[in-house]
Amino acid sequence: MDQDIIFMKRALELSRLGASMTHPNPMVGAVIVKNNRIIGEGWHRGPGFPHAEIEAINSCREDPEGATLFVTLEPCNHWGKTPPCTDAIIKARIAIVKFAVKDNNCDVTGCGDEKLRATGIKVETGLCRDEAFEINRSFFYHCQTGRPWIIMKSATSLDGKITTAGGESRWITGQPARQMVHQLRSQVGAVLVGSGTLIKDNPELTNRLHEPIVRQPLKVLLDSELRVSSEKRLVKDNPDNLLVFCTERASLSKMKTLQDRGVRVKRQSVSQKVDLIDVLDTLGSLKIRSILVEGGSEIFGSFLREDLIQEFYLFYAPFFIGGAASKGVAGGDGIKALQDARRLKINTIDKVGEDILIHAYKEELTACLPV
């Protein structure tokens, strides 16, 4: 394997250490190489912390002058919560910068690669580009569209049922699958459910199993009529981290009660179901770059019908439920002809404990890759 690829893959490996910490920032890793040896490395640990390039420079065991910097994302050239990385790279007298993928962040002013080249630093891009994009797919998607990357997580029987005929749904899958769901929660900006799931399961929508727990995702509830009560866990536990979308059918007094508890409520000027496009636009404006949609059946059906899901984690338990009264994973009217079905691109099929996990995408990952 080419030495450059080895060094960039190490940077990619480092970037993944920030998976549950960096949102809404991207995951970034960096390696500094001199005389074909790694002399410094670092990764971004979250908003307000030094970027990966700074961590790598600060960790150098010898002078980085004349060295090569391998970094998974184009170095920034703007002031945010931290100074521009380009300034630190220039000051360190690094000779060559090789980054995997260009930064298309709509909040960034100025181009890092142009500034580096202007000072005489040699810049190369594109090494391990697709892998670097895959790690930060939700970041790039949000920057391009202004909306969050949507991930569907379902747990069903082999015949696609999410409840028994009696309404029982906890727990269909085993502990290893639930552990993975908490890991997903730790990585996304928000977790979303509908009022049916709220009433039936009384979920917390928090990461309680995946370490380290450094932040919790925003809890999002779609509740057209504001059926949620103040006794539900979503309201009782950290109500200021809950955002509820309702319609004109919702009680104004109920809305005020929730707001007095600290809950954010957005009342849409629609009379039927919550407008999903408005939900995504609102969350996107709040810098929520990714959402884990956890159900229930009607919510899944609505998101699928409007073709709003980009990624799928579909868990299947090794048994059948059967019966017309037991709910399937996708509610609503469904499709009338097979030719109308939207086929997924299956990425992997794995065994998680006793369960099966299908990880899939709506389309090719490179659809929103920066040019």
Image: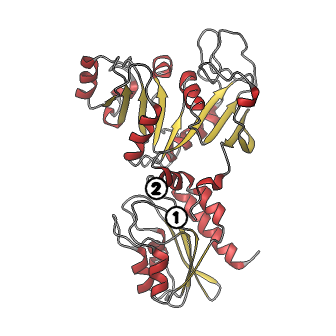
Mark drawn on residue 22: 2
Question: Which quadrant of the figure has residue 361?
Answer: top right
Q: Is residue 119 left or right of residue 365?
A: left
Q: Residue at x 48, y 36 (%)?
A: 191
Q: Is residue 96 left or right of residue 165?
A: left
Question: Which quadrant of the figure has residue 325?
Answer: top right
Instruction: Answer above or below: position of 134 versus 34.
Output: above
Residue 222 x %, y %: 43, 27
Mark drawn on residue 323: none
Amino acid of disc 1: Val
Characterize the local packing of mark 2: few (<14), some (14-19) or many (20 or more) Cα atoms within 10 angstroms.
Answer: many
Residue 228 x %, y %: 38, 20
- Work out how far the residue at label 2 is from the one at label 1, CA to CA, in angstroms: 9 Å
Viewport quadrant of the C terminus: bottom right
* Between 196 and 354, the one nearer to me in the picture: 196
Residue 53 x %, y %: 48, 73
Q: Secondary structure at mark 1?
A: loop
Instruction: Answer above or below: position of 184 versus 112.
Output: above
Viewport quadrant of the N terminus: bottom right
* Between 90 and 202, the one nearer to me in the picture: 90
Characterize the local packing of mark 1: few (<14), some (14-19) or many (20 or more) Cα atoms within 10 angstroms.
Answer: many
N-term mark: 2 or 1 = 2
Q: Which residue is mark 1?
A: 28
Q: Secondary structure at mark 2?
A: loop
* Between 262 and 354, the one nearer to me in the picture: 262
Instruction: Answer above or below: position of 133 versus 332.
Output: below
Residue 354 x %, y %: 73, 32
Whether the residues at callouts 2 and 1 have beta carbons within 8 Å, the answer is: yes
Q: Residue at x 38, y 24 (%)?
A: 270
Amino acid of disc 2: Thr
